[in-house]
Structures are given as structure tokens and as C-alpha cells.
Image: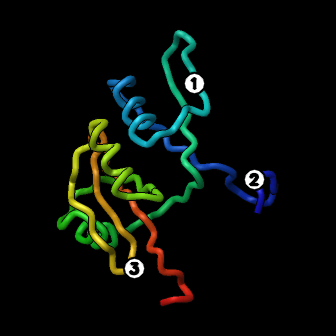
């Protein structure tokens, strides 16, 4: 389905983060993830930028599922109401870049029961994020 399909009820998901230290968070996400801004606003009434981060999905968990995922990725219930999950091609490289740019390790990488390689981090403002690398095993090979 294309983005121009008028029958598609949502065309794009955007997550807006508000921070007290704009430059720190811009540097963290741009340099830490290696992403160039798609748009920048600085009109004298504040600053903002847009980062294209691939396709977007919205996951809605009940408390029991959030507990299950936190146990797998962090060993205990630690995430808040919102947590990012970013698929990356090389988990170790992405994790190291983010750690070098101010991320805090919540829990070392784990292999999930479904075979993905996940790590839990916290950005400089405390937002928890999961980086995940999809298993090389295809569904047909399982």
C-alpha cells in the first residue's frame, strides 16, 4: 500500500520528544544513530528537527506483555509507558555508537525466544530504547 493511497487511514507515524537540552539530544540521536536531519526548524520561536527512521509501527502492550518484554530484555520491569524499539543492521556497532554518545546500558544484549538479538539502553533524557537485530534465520528455515 502506498502512502498516497487515500484508503489508508494513517500515512505516517511521528514521535515528538521534548527535551530541556535540545543540542544534547540532537547530537545523541543524529551522531549516535548516524542519521542526518530530514528537516530543521529554527524560526526564533524554538528549535526542532525531523529524523527519518525507516518505517514506523505502533505497538500497544498490556502490563503483562510489558512485564514479559522487560524481563527478557532487562531482567526486571523497568520501562515506562513509552519505549523505542529500533531495528538496526548491526546491533553491536549501533549499541557502541549510542554508548559513545551518552546512552546508558540498562541491560547487556540478549537473544530473545524468537531469535532476535536485543539490547536495552537509555538515552540522555532517560527514554528507554531497545535496539534489535533480526535473526538471520528466515521463517522458512524454522
What is the spatial separation of the Cα atoms under label 2 and label 3, in whole angstroms? 30 Å
The answer to whether mark 3 and mark 1 are in CB contact below 8 A is no
Left/right placement of residue 1 relative to residue 98 reads right
Q: Secondary structure at mark 2?
A: loop
Q: Residue at x 64, y 49 (%)?
A: 12
Numbered tag placed on residue 40 in the rendering: 1
Look at mark 2 in the image and give the residue it sits on. Answer: 3
Q: Secondary structure at mark 1?
A: strand
Mark 3, residues whose alpha carbon is within 10 Å: few (<14), some, or many (≥20)?
few
Mark 1, residues whose alpha carbon is within 10 Å: few (<14), some, or many (≥20)?
few
- Judged by depth in the image, the label closer to the viewer, 2 or 3, is 3
Which x, y percent locates residue 40?
57, 24
Numbered tag placed on residue 114 in the rendering: 3
Which x, y percent locates residue 131?
38, 57
Which x, y percent locates residue 63?
31, 67
Q: Quadrant of residue 60?
A: bottom left
Q: Residue at x 38, y 77 (%)?
A: 115
Label 3 vs 1, first from the N-terminus: 1
Amino acid at each position: 500500500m502506498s502512502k498516497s493511497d487515500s484508503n489508508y487511514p494513517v500515512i505516517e507515524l511521528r514521535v515528538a520528544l521534548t527535551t530541556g537540552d535540545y543540542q544534547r539530544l540532537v547530537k545523541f540521536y543524529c551522531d549516535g544513530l548516524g542519521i542526518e536531519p530530514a528537516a530543521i526548524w529554527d524560526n526564533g520561536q524554538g528549535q526542532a528537527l525531523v529524523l527519518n527512521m525507516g518505517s514506523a509501527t505502533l505497538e500497544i502492550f498490556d502490563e503483562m506483555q510489558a512485564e514479559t518484554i522487560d524481563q527478557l530484555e532487562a531482567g526486571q520491569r523497568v520501562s515506562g509507558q513509552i519505549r523505542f524499539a529500533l531495528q538496526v543492521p548491526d546491533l553491536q556497532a549501533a549499541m557502541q555508537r549510542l554508548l559513545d554518545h551518552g546512552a546508558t546500558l540498562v541491560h547487556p544484549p540478549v537473544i530473545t525466544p524468537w531469535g532476535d538479538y536485543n539490547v536495552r539502553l537509555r538515552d540522555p533524557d532517560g527514554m528507554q530504547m531497545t535496539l534489535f537485530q533480526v535473526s538471520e534465520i528466515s521463517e522458512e528455515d524454522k
